[in-house]
Amino acid sequence: MEHASAVAIVDAQGIVTGWSEGARQLTGHPAEEVVGHPVRELLAEEPPSEAVAALHGTAALRHRDGSTVTLRLRACALQGPGGEPAGYTVTVEPPQDHASLLAGQAFQQASMSMSVFDTRQRYLRLNDVACRVMGVPEEALLGRHFPDSVEDAEYNRGFLANLRQVAETGLSVRYESFAGAPSLNREHAWSIEMWPLKDAATGETTAVALAAFDSTEQYWARRRLALLNEAAASIGTSLDVVRTAEELVELLAPGYADFASVDLLDWVLGADERPALPGADITLRRVAHGSGTEGTPEAAVRVGETDVYPAFTPPAKALRTGRAVLSQAGEPDFVRWVAERNARAPEGRRHRTGAHSVLAVPLRARGTTLGVMVCVRIGNPDDYGTDDAVLGEELASRAAVCIDNARRFARERTTALALQHSLLPRGLPGQAAVEVAHRYLPSGSLAGIGGDWFDVIPLSGSRVALVVGDVVGHGIPSSATMGRLCTAVRTLADVDLPPDELLTHLDDLVTHLASDDADEVAELGATCLYAVYDPVSSRLTMAAAGHPPPALLLPDGTASLVPMTAGPPLGVGGLPFEATELELPEGAVVALYTDGLIEDRDRDVDHATDELCRALTAPADTLDTLCDTVLKAVLPEEPSDDVALLLARTRALGADQVATWDITPDPERVAAARQAATEQLTAWGLDEAAFVTELVVSELVTNAIRYGAPPVQLRLIRDRTLICEVSDGSSTSPHLRRAHAFDEGGRGLLLVAQLTQRWGSRQTGSGKTIWAEQPLPPG
């Protein structure tokens, strides 16, 4: 209603005789309260005399609620029948200049909602957009208190508080709000600015104006962007397929969806590669779901179970097309899907009614379809649209890459672990030198399986080699390199090289492997500790290549690290390795381990080795129990590297198990050597082995006297096998050859090889030793 329609008629005595509806809207006074009363009762203050004389000017009127309404008025004199003054017609003076007219039009026709309230939060003016938002014409709101026009109490409180703040402080307010409106069927986002309207003369706030911009599209665009940013930070925090799916569901529900689920093809959760394209009906396994309702009543399939999706269902369509599929309540396929699922579902697990919109998005990464993400809206009144589908595809794409990364990591980890386990000793060979126990713990870190390894290798003369090593790096390349080193160490150990010489040859091998590809030099680096224990002499000889020293537990209960000089890691080359030798009492425990046991980012190595020595002294019934005690005491809760631990308790062969004779280098002494060996076998109760042993002793002693150098020594060892050893001062090693028909010699070693279980030779500090083993007679 225009201000010009506000009219009052005053007679010559100053009594109000007429009062229009517009005047009531401006002042709040109805006609029955004004007509018949002096006009001065409406004035808040006396008008300026010049305004009274000119019959136009600004006047301050008293509103019905006690506030002051300042208006620009114009009076027109009324004449009686005789021309005498009969009264005045008073109207609100409309703006006369063009600028004011344009300002009024701009307010009324603005594309945003604009309103004006008095200082007591009553409507004074609304433009066309504000009326459409409120759903009523301007006349229905003018003069009403704002809270009476809005039903949303939460929105009411916030909006009203800001109106009062502007009226009381005279300062502008700008804020954002998300609320509905009487004429809108959904909530909208609003960018609202309120500012005071002040009297030009006094500077006092007389009204509050506001403009509200509908920023719903911008709001949802920001929400989508924020969701994508949150997805980048919250999805894929671990290389675990199921956990990654759970993180996706936690992101989707209950904000983006009232219910969300992630179903994967079975092969994704296994170590096998993807099979051929499934048939018309697709079977998927539920790995995660969630909703805004406690207990997830919307789920018709439990986590871990499989469900069959017919070809017409949104998940099956999404998997086949590779694009997001929208489905709304009332569509035939949607109704059919819910009906068939309810028919198959057990009682109490039927699909909850009320779902009106479904979005199914395939999880695809690197050209491979892994599964499907399903979002359902129940309480949210808005159906999924094109923008939601685009957002869903982006979220699914990011999640699928994380799921595929986790799948690939799990597959590589499984492969590396299987490879490593196949290379590590499964059942340690039986021998009399040491009692052993071992533990191998693969790392759970994201770096993957490392190259830690250990081995126990039986040597000639009842000796045993104890080996532990660590290859730099993780994953399948590290495990493959570890396998090469394992094989190389066993081969070099079979040659019976001393520890320092064996590490020198192993170092040359690693350098050679690294030279094949310069980019892999660092990854082919490794450390190794090689030790040989002789139960006859009770001596332990060892050498290390960049590896931590072993710990030694003596029978008296004291434990300490073995002092030794560790050479450089394998692959560095150019530097020698130094052997350390010590004599051990029977029952001593040697602990060999990899650096994962004592080294970590947040640990002090010296403190960890002290803990290792203390743990070794703990009472334990068996070596297996001691292994567990050491790991529990020394390892952190989450080791960052693989750990290999090998414990060996020494044994000693008594004098009743070893017989030694010094042989004079004279061919006539061969018969005496045979006789001495036969008598010793009789003393041991091994008469059945006497025939073969006589032949072996005769051949080996004869060769030592004929081709070797003094001193010559014969030794018999009764262990798990019967061992015959002949040592001499020559370093020339014998070898088998096939003798021709008329050759006088060359058949002795061939005969030894055929009669015994195995034979060989090894270099010693003073020459060589030729040995042969034969099984003990039954019983």
Image (cartoon, rainbow, N blue to C red):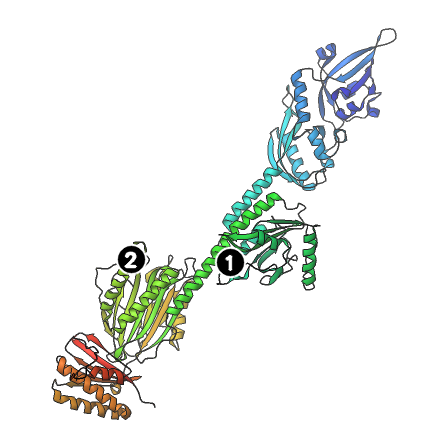
Give, as a three-letter code, the residue at label 1: Val
Q: Residue furthest top?
A: 82
Kindly state the secondary structure of the residue where label 2 is placed.
Answer: loop
* Nearer-the-camera pick, 1 or 17: 1
Q: Residue furthest right?
A: 81
Q: Earlier in the sequence, mark 1 or mark 2?
A: 1
* Nearer-the-camera pick, 71 or 456: 456
* Nearer-the-camera pick, 543 or 210: 543
Give, as a three-letter code, the residue at label 2: Asp
Residue 757 left/right relative to 229: left
| Disc nearest the viewer among 1 and 2 | 2
Which residue bears the numbered disc 2? 516
From the image, which quarter does the C terminus lie in?
bottom left
Residue 193 left/right relative to 666: right
Residue 242: where, in percent of width, then height? 53, 59
From the image, which quarter does the N terminus lie in?
top right
Residue 773: where, in percent of width, then height? 27, 83
Q: Is residue 672 above or below residue 761?
A: below
Kindly state the secondary structure of the residue where label 1 is placed.
Answer: helix
* Res 543 quadrant in image: bottom left
Asked whether residue 619 appears in the rendered view, the answer is no
Few, some or many C-alpha atoms within 10 Å of disc 2 (few <14, some 14-19, many ≥20)?
few
Which residue bears the numbered disc 1? 241
